[in-house]
Image (cartoon, rainbow, N blue to C red):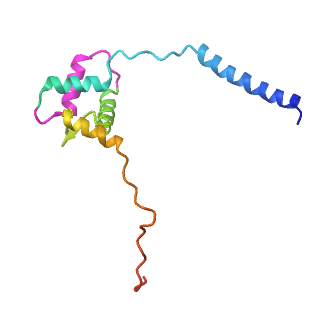
């Protein structure tokens, strides 16, 4: 192949990329900033304000947030809140106790952070269990 033949293929690739960037820039659909704080901030505020010893339920958190952010929340707010609470528990930012959510204690937050940093020990490759002689199915 000659260098002249390779040049048109590069030229074809570049205009397609520029079309995509131009299309996204001129589409006019800009992402609006949210009119409410993050779910983590709202849930944290609700749990602190409710001061329940055993933690705050999803329903109590939802009611508190609805009172605070009446007109700003989306229609499917309660479903989104459930999903976000589950994510926050998985990330260690909240602790789930039965059907309630609590803020993690400072010592448990440090433990969760240190657990993520430590890689799990891998079993040795040579330590495979030996097949048993005797009965066969």
Viewer-proximal residue among 85 and 80? 85
Viewer-proximal residue among 128 and 71? 128
Write down the quadrant of residue 65 in the picture.
top left
Badge count:
0
Q: Residue at x 29, y 26 (%)?
A: 40
Q: Relative to residue 45, is residue 17 drawn left or right? A: right
Q: Relative to residue 77, is residue 30 drawn left or right? A: right
Q: Residue at x 63, y 19 (%)?
A: 21
Write down the quadrant of residue 24 in the picture.
top right
Q: Where is residue 52? Give x, y as percent.
A: 11, 30
Q: Quadrant of the N terminus?
A: top right
Residue farthest to the left, as pictured: 53
Is 65 a magenta residue?
Answer: yes
Q: Where is residue 18? Give x, y as percent.
A: 68, 20
Q: Where is residue 89? Give x, y as percent.
A: 28, 37
Q: Is residue 12 above or below residue 35?
A: below
- The residue segment tinted magenta is 53-75
Q: Residue at x 15, y 34 (%)?
A: 55
Is 76 a magenta residue?
Answer: no
Q: Is residue 133 visible?
A: yes
Q: Where is residue 29? Give x, y as percent.
A: 53, 16
Residue farthest to the bottom, as pictured: 134
Viewer-proximal residue among 54 and 66? 54
Q: Is residue 101 visible?
A: no
Q: Quadrant of the C terminus?
A: bottom left
Q: Residue at x 36, y 50 (%)?
A: 120
């Amino acid at each position: 192949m000659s260098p002249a033949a390779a040049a048109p293929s590069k030229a074809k690739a570049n205009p397609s990329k520029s079309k995509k960037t131009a299309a996204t820039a001129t589409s006019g659909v800009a992402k609006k900033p949210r009119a409410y704080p993050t779910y983590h901030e709202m849930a944290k505020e609700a749990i602190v304000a409710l001061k329940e010893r055993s933690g705050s339920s999803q329903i109590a958190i939802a009611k508190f947030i609805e009172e605070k952010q009446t007109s700003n929340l989306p229609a499917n707010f309660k479903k989104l809140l459930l999903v976000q609470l589950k994510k926050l528990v998985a990330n260690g930012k909240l602790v789930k106790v039965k059907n309630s959510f609590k803020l993690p204690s400072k010592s448990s937050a440090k433990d969760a952070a240190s657990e993520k940093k430590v890689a799990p020990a891998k079993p040795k490759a040579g330590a495979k269990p030996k097949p048993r002689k005797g009965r066969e199915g």
